Image: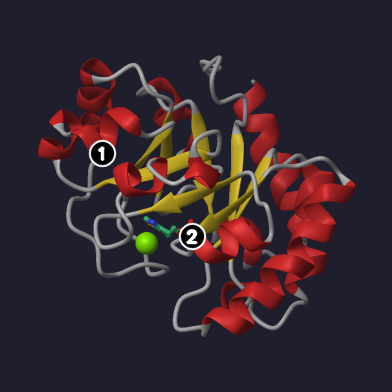
Amino acid sequence: MNLHPKFPYQLYLVISEKDCLGKDFLKVAEDAILGGVDIIQLREKNTGTKEFLTKALQLKEVTEKYNIPLIINDHPEVTEKTDAFGIHVGNSDTPPMTLRGQSFFKEKMIGYSIEYLEQLENKQTSISDYLGVSPIFSTKTKEDTVTEWGLDGLSLIRTLTDKPLIAIGNINLNNAQMIIKAGANSLAVVSAICAAEHPEQAAYELKNEILK
Ligand code: TZP
Ligand code: MG
């Protein structure tokens, strides 16, 4: 994998309690770190801010123990209250420009999902630290998506920006290599690790594939 100097996190776990299918999500996170995950995002949909904050504080204890950066999906207040490493937002969330204008987010990592090619020309993209190519392949984990980029879409985006590109959507051991070849600087997964019977082993195998 082509390591990006501004985003040296090659295996990116996006975790939610629901996607861990009954397993303790904090244990899944810890096992995933032991298996080789480099960065973790907490993404809980349909959860109130209070409950989300509780989970974020619990997860922060795990990530801090291993010195792994924690990214918070969608919630600026939770990012601030947990003093997380950064935030990930999409088109319907607080825009990156708005976040960057707040003193807390000046030095924080801001990730932004790319769902339309036109986004590559806007200021939200240029002010973001990394871009999510979302989704690379369609997935049951997130069904309200816009563009299934595929390998050709990822290659095209690669020619249009120097930003770190994080591929997400139905990534597994079978397709990891081709996504890397198409230009991803990081692979983000939910079910390949969260839904696995042995999350540590699953993370280890994915990381090995990345390091091949
Ligand atoms: N954004 C685009 S696809 C996706 C998100 C959060 C879900 C990816 O889940 P999985 O299980 O790795 O396909
Ligand atoms: Mg969002």
Q: Residue at x 29, y 21 (%)?
A: 158
What residue type is disc 2 on? Answer: Pro
Q: Which of the pair 131/169 is nearer the observer? A: 131
Q: Quadrant of ligand 2?
A: bottom left
Identify the element where label 1 is drawn: helix
Which residue is labeled 2 in the image?
76
Q: Amino acid at mark 1?
A: Gln
The N terminus sits in image quarter:
top right
- Where does residue 146 sit, x and y in percent of width and height? 18, 57
User: Which residue does the image show at 16% across and 34% down from the upper left?
Assistant: 122
Judge from the rendering whether residue 156 lies leftward or rightward of residue 95; answer left or right: left
Task: Name the secondary structure under disc 2.
Answer: helix
Q: Say if 74 sits above or below 110 in the image.
A: below
Residue furthest right in the image: 65
Image side of residue 160 versus residue 36, left or right: left
Instruction: Tell me the CA gap for discs 1 and 2.
Output: 16 Å
Which residue position holds label 1? 124
Q: Residues within 10 Å of mark 2 (few under 14, many from 20)?
A: some
Q: Please, is residue 160 above or below residue 202 in the view?
A: above
